[in-house]
Image (cartoon, grey):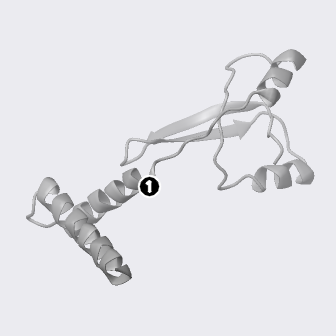
Amino acid sequence: MSNLLTQVTLDRANRKKDKSVSLTFVTQLEQSSEQFMEIDEKIGDSGVLFFKPSGNLTKEEIKELNKSEIEVEGKTQSQKIRNKIWVLWSKLKTDTSQNDFYKNKTEKILDYLQKEIDLLD
């Protein structure tokens, strides 16, 4: 997968429910159909954003960035499960406390997994 390098302006930032941030960038220059296709191919990909707020990257900086091996980490599976449980709790508008709801849901997951293990014995 090739890297995407283009001049942009940080247009806006919005805080999300899970405390992540949605960033919107706008290209400073018009983009050809080919350049747009290259951007479009990256939609949904995870990566690392290096934003230099002024000037252009030098050839040396680009070379160093391209050869660096940056490990991209998203949320762990357990963090994703936890977040889904909190979202479910907030949408159900139940009288159950967040902690009790979380404990109940995780107990159900653990029970399910134990049943799967027991079937293999």
Look at 29% across and 61% down and name the residue there: 85
> Where is residue 110 shown, x and y percent of the image?
26, 67
* Above or below for 116 versus 101: below
Q: In screen coordinates, is 62 left or right of 46? A: right
Q: In screen coordinates, is 102 left or right of 29? A: left
The amino acid on which the numbered mark 1 sits, given as a three-letter code, is Gln
> Where is residue 67 shown, x and y percent of the image?
81, 28
* Above or below for 68 versus 121: above
Q: How many numbered circles does the render carry?
A: 1
Q: Give residue 93's quadrant in the image.
A: bottom left
Give the labeled residue for mark 1.
77
Q: In screen coordinates, is 103 left or right of 19? A: left
Look at 34% across and 83% down and name the residue there: 119
Q: In screen coordinates, is 96 left or right of 20? A: left
Look at 80% across and 21% down and name the residue there: 64
**Nearest the eye: 78 or 3:** 78
Q: Secondary structure at mark 1?
A: helix
